Image (tube, helix red, strand yellow):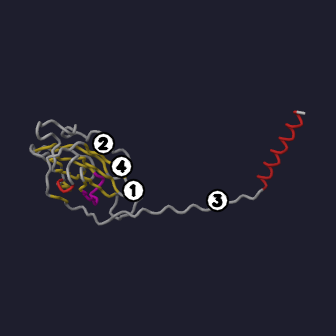
Amino acid sequence: MIQSRTICATVVLLGATLATAAAPAVAAPPAAPAAATACPTGWGSGDKAAGAATAESVRNVRTGRHDCYDRMVVDVPGAARGDLGYSVRYVDRLHQDGSGRHIPVSGGAVLEVRVTAPAYDPGTGAATYPARAGRPLPGVDLTGYRTFRDARFAGSFEGDTQLGLGVRGRLPFRVQQLDGHLVIDVAHTWTGAAR
């Protein structure tokens, strides 16, 4: 009795398998082509600056990768957008404020990023951002970035914090002031097309 049930179950499964195999294959609808990312253009590579200052301190610097650009964010918690002054420009060599010491930065071009906020507590002088002059930015790993090549701390002197950002070449960039953050985006190309 058990043997005949097993034979019947096997015949039913075999029939279902053969019916499925004999049915015509139905092709899945073709996948829609991936939409090309339209990247912003018109940023230019000229100097960019905003005159303002804050006593709030730099607490962190971080980076991120996007389809059209690489991004650096300087975190200055408590600073209002209009109080975050800056100067961002391409330089031939990065020289530390105060001492004039040359700080080597790898890449085809060097962006000097100055934020008018100290990387120390103005009341005590204690560091609020754990970076050392001439060294890579702590916690920043640029492996796999299309544009960024190096990121160095130059120092914090008389209320300004100075960073060096090594990039692949002299590419367009923009700077955005947000509450508590200064954002620097460097485009991957001049053409405005993502790859």
Would you say residue 173 sits in the magenta stretch? yes
Residue type pointed to by label 4 = Tyr
Q: State the residue in front, 69 or 8.
A: 8
Give x and y (percent) for residue 33. 52, 63
Residue type pointed to by label 3 = Ala
Residue identified by numbered label 3: 28
Q: Dot 2: within a 10 Å radius of its alpha carbon, few (fewer than 14), some, or many (20 or more) residues? A: some
The tag earlier along the polypeptide, 4 or 3, is 3
Alpha carbon separation for disc pair 1 and 3? 29 Å
Give the residue drawn at x 21%, y 39%.
Answer: 129
Q: Circle 2 sits in a helix, a strand or a loop, which is it? A: loop
Residue identified by numbered label 4: 145
Alpha carbon separation for disc pair 4 and 1? 11 Å
Would you say residue 140 sits in the magenta stretch? no
Q: Circle 4 sits in a helix, a strand or a loop, which is it? A: loop
Give the residue drawn at x 25%, y 51%.
Answer: 181
Q: Which portion, as a residue range, is magenta?
A: 167-176
Residue identified by numbered label 2: 140
Residue identified by numbered label 1: 67
The tag earlier along the polypeptide, 2 or 4, is 2
